[in-house]
Amino acid sequence: MQGAGLEIDSFSGAEVIGHIDAGTGHHTPWGMVHGGVYAAAVETACSVGASTAVDEAGQFAVGLSNHTDFLRAHREGRLDVSAVPVHQGRTGQLWHCDITREDGKLVAQGRVRLQNVPRP
């Protein structure tokens, strides 16, 4: 995802791993990474995993809700992104995503609820 700078390192229907090399391009006017970067990364990681999980069924997943909490301020440096499913059902999924800094401390955390829909 270009705007948030999320690079997907690996993905499956059971886990998505990525990272963001945060810097000044991600900052608010006050010099901290903007919360929208975290929300977009959470949405993207969860959507990639959820869509991969239902791909063989001829479906993809669309986000219905995204609840992202911003827990710790961050200025620059690598942020690791990890998303896993909480529930994968026939018509919907719930995914959880953690964003941590290099020392392992949690910076943001989110959950995305998704609906499985047929591919056009």
Image (cartoon, grey):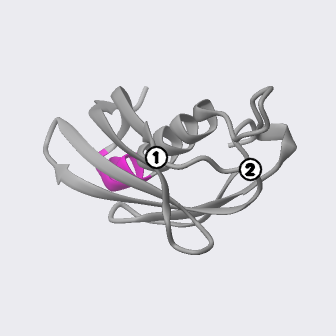
Give the label on residue 2, or none: none
Residue 14 location (% of width, % of height): 33, 65
Dot 1: element:
loop
Q: Residue at x 34, y 42 (%)?
A: 58
Residue found 62% across the figure and 72% down from its top: 102
Q: Position of residue 39 (x, y in %)?
A: 52, 35
Q: Is residue 5 left or right of residue 12?
A: right
In the rendered image, residue 16, in percent from the top left (x then y), is placed at 46, 62
- Residue denoted by label 2: 75
What kind of residue is marked 1?
Leu
Question: Disc 1 designates what residue?
Answer: 71
| 29, above or below 91, in the image | above
- Count of numbered circles in the view: 2
Task: Look at the image and say whether residue 50 sits in the magenta stretch.
Answer: yes
The residue depicted at 85 percent of the width and 39 percent of the height is 25
**Where is residue 73 drawn, in percent x and y?**
60, 47
Quick check: is 20 in the magenta stretch?
A: no
Q: Nearer the viewer, residue 100 or 4?
A: 100
- Image: magenta residue range: 49-57
Q: Is residue 83 left or right of residue 94?
A: right
Kind of residue sitting beneath label 2: Arg
Q: CA distance from mark 2 to mark 1?
A: 13 Å
